[in-house]
Amino acid sequence: MLIKISSLDVKYGYKTVLKNMNLTLDSGEIVTIVGPNGSGKTTLFKAIIGAIPISKGKIYTKPNLRIGYVPQQLKIDQTLPITVERFLKLAHKNFNRSLDKIEALLGSKDLLNIQVNNLSGGQMQRVLLARALINNPEILLLDEATRGLDQPGVASFYRKIENIRNSTNCAILMISHDLHVVMSSSNRVICVNGHICCEGAPESVATSPEYKALFGSDVDGTFALYRHHHDHKHDSKIER
């Protein structure tokens, strides 16, 4: 077990944002958190990495747990001249020894010389993912990491995430609004709206009344898409 969250409450002033959260995460799992805007998803991530205080409960982590974190967005001063190479060196002391790995994660060594402020959305996503993976994390936290990507880019990103899990056994905890893709990529889905509304295997969550109450009538289509992606992946594995 990498993380165990027990009876967690988080407040901003007098407002309770998260109430009685219980969650465990093991090596090799891909767990997705879904929920409406303002439901406390990002707050949960901030609590896990120690960026905000908790009001009640406990967060247990494996000793010396290595965490990689890809934020929802990264604000960089537009007047700050910094290349991708320099940006990544700030995160990794042995940058030069890991250069081959970094170039593989970026998909191109040419990206290293580009100014961070000149990156496209897809390029920035690759840079942030590379930065999170440089130190071989045991768990990767992804906060809506596909925001701003087109549909092929989103699908490509989730394939990459599955490959990372398969090759490293790294656990992945992610927040996403890409419901049908998430359903096909996750071992577990947790539906949050200030508390855990429902959780479990994707097929059980997608058909639960709590999930439908939050996401409306479109969830039936989402479940159909989940089955299509799931069956297609299964058929592909058989063919290989």
Image (tube, rainbow, N blue to C red):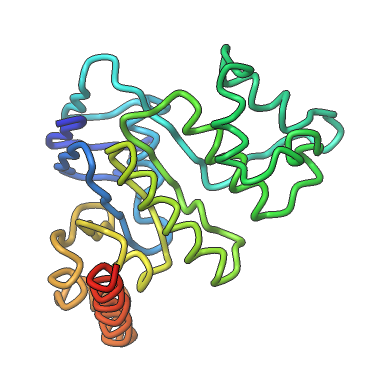
Depth check, front residue: 3 or 134: 134
Could you say which is closer to the camera, residue 167 or residue 62?
Answer: 167
Instruction: Decide if residue 130 is on the left or right side of residue 27.
Output: right
Q: Residue at x 53, y 47 (%)?
A: 72
Residue that protrudes farthest toward the front in the picture? 240
Horizontal side of 63 relative to 129 (left or right) equals: left
Give 112 or 237, whichever is nearer the viewer.
Answer: 237
Residue 86 location, quadrant: top right
Which residue is found at the position 28% from the left and 76% from the top? 226
Q: Position of residue 166 (x, y in %)?
A: 30, 46
Q: Quadrant of residue 90?
A: top right
Q: Is residue 39 above or below residue 230?
A: above
Which quarter of the picture shows residue 98?
top right
Q: Is residue 173 above or below residue 99?
A: below
The N terminus sits in image quarter: top left
Which residue is found at the position 14% from the left and 74% from the top?
Answer: 208
- Which quarter shows the C terminus? bottom left
Q: Left of 37 or right of it: where is 223?
A: left
| Left or right of 89 in this view: 222 | left
Residue 199: x and y in percent read 15, 59
Q: Nearer the viewer, residue 59 or 101?
A: 101
Q: Position of residue 225 (x, y in %)?
A: 32, 82
Q: Position of residue 35 (x, y in %)?
A: 33, 62
**How many marks can you see?**
0
Residue drawn at x 18%, y 43% is 21
